[in-house]
Image (tube, helix red, strand yellow):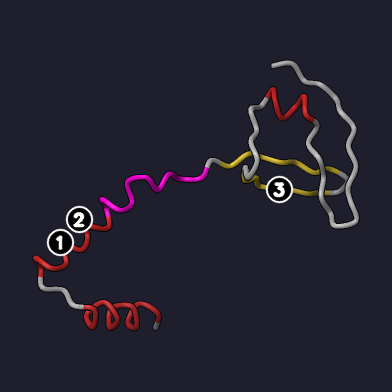
Amino acid sequence: MENKIEITSMSSKGQVVIPLDIRERLELKEGEKFIIIGEDDTICLKKVKMPSFKNFDNLFKKTQDFAKQKGIKKEDLDEAVKRARK
């Protein structure tokens, strides 16, 4: 991928526009998440891929079934959380 220099500016709210050419080349979409690192006069953005939650409902159902099968109650979880936070 060829590096290309673009110029942008920051708004009064601290918003910076990523130029269209770069967004298209990197296939950036609205709502993308980034890690931002700043040091001296350098700012670096790194695109972060968020985990998919498409199978979360299935995993949650399996967890509920497991807890029910083992006889784990809400009170048991509350107590375990209290012990872990000490």
Q: Residue 79: give x, y in percent of width and height.
A: 27, 83
Residue 62 disc label? 2
The quadrant of the image that shows the C terminus is: bottom left
Q: Is residue 4 above or below residue 80?
A: above
Instruction: Tell me which segment is drawn in magenta.
Output: 50-59
Q: Closer to the N terminus: mark 1 or mark 3? A: 3
Residues at marks 3 and 2, CA–CA distance in whole angstroms: 37 Å
Q: Mark 1 near mark 2, Cβ–Cβ under 8 Å?
A: yes
Q: Is residue 30 above or below residue 72?
A: above
The quadrant of the image that shows the N terminus is: top right
Q: Residue at x 32, y 46 (%)?
A: 55
Say if the magenta span includes residue 55: yes
Residue 66 disc label? 1
Q: Is residue 46 left or right of residue 56?
A: right
Q: Residue at x 15, y 61 (%)?
A: 65
Given the image, on which type of amino acid does mark 1 rest?
A: Phe
Residues at marks 1 and 3, CA–CA distance in whole angstroms: 40 Å
